[in-house]
Image: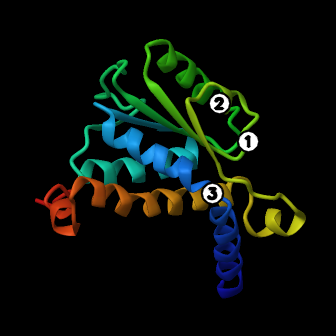
């Protein structure tokens, strides 16, 4: 287990080292300026997106996950963040195309900047992973992409917190409570 986790951490570090900081700054500014923020992804990418959505809610932002029964409609003043490793997941591409038609901004997090999703987005952030035999054994399917996206989002959280004047105590006040 220690060898595997060391390998995964090293690979994620390499992926995140390639991230364009100017794109991250643009993403942060779009999140802060949006009237509502929507997040979408399928499978494990969706779970990573949901975890980010929770933190955004805890910062007091108006955030929804697309596909939930209480999700309102997307409007022109809104932002949609879509997570898709391949950038070819049909529902992700369709979502981007639909919300762009209403005038909303679309951010995609993907490993494929040539994908349909990236092409349908206003801003795309690429998390590139190399798929060799070793990686397929230790990090099957989209594991490195999903883990890298999770850490990317968690790295963006304190930046947004600082810009919004938030701290851990203010987030805790919006944290889920047990009754």
Q: Check disc 1 and report the residue beneath it.
A: 112
| Left or right of residue 40, residue 65 in this image | left
Mark 2 or 1, nearer chain start: 1
Q: Which mark is residue 117?
A: 2
Mark 2 against mark 3, which lies toward the viewer? 3
| Left or right of residue 121, residue 35 in this image | left
How many marks on residues? 3
Q: Position of residue 66 (x, y in %)?
A: 42, 31
Q: Nearer the viewer, residue 56 or 146?
A: 56
Mark 2 or 3, nearer chain start: 3
Q: Which mark is residue 43?
A: none
Q: In the picture shown, does residue 3 fall above or below 44?
A: below
Q: Position of residue 54 (x, y in %)?
A: 33, 51
Q: Residue at x 60, y 60 (%)?
A: 148
Looking at the rendered image, the quarter that the N terminus falls into is: bottom right
* Identity of the residue furthest to the front in this view: 22
Crowd band around label 3 with a 10 angstrom C-alpha radius: few (<14), some (14–19), many (20+): some
Looking at the rendered image, the quarter that the C terminus falls into is: bottom left
Quick check: marks 2 and 1 in contact, CB under 8 Å?
A: yes
Q: In the picture shown, does residue 68 fall above or below 1?
A: above
Mark 2 to mark 3: distance in Å? 18 Å
């Amino acid at each position: 287990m220690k060898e595997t986790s060391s390998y995964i951490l090293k690979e994620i570090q390499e992926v995140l080292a390639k991230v364009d900081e100017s794109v991250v700054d643009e993403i942060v500014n779009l999140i802060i300026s949006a009237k509502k923020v929507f997040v979408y992804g399928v499978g494990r990418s969706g779970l990573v997106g949901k975890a980010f959505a929770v933190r955004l809610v805890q910062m007091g932002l108006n955030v929804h996950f697309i596909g939930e029964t209480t999700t309102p409609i997307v409007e022109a003043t809104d932002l949609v963040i879509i997570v898709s490793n391949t950038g070819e997941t049909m529902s992700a591409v369709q979502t981007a195309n639909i919300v762009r038609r209403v005038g909303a901004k679309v951010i995609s997090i993907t490993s494929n900047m040539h994908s349909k999703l990236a092409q349908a987005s206003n801003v795309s952030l690429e998390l590139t992973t190399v798929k060799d035999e070793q990686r397929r054994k230790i990090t099957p399917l989209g594991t490195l992409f999903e883990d890298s996206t999770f850490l990317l989002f968690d790295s963006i959280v304190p930046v947004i917190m600082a810009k919004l004047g938030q701290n851990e105590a203010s987030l805790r006040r919006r944290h889920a409570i047990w009754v």
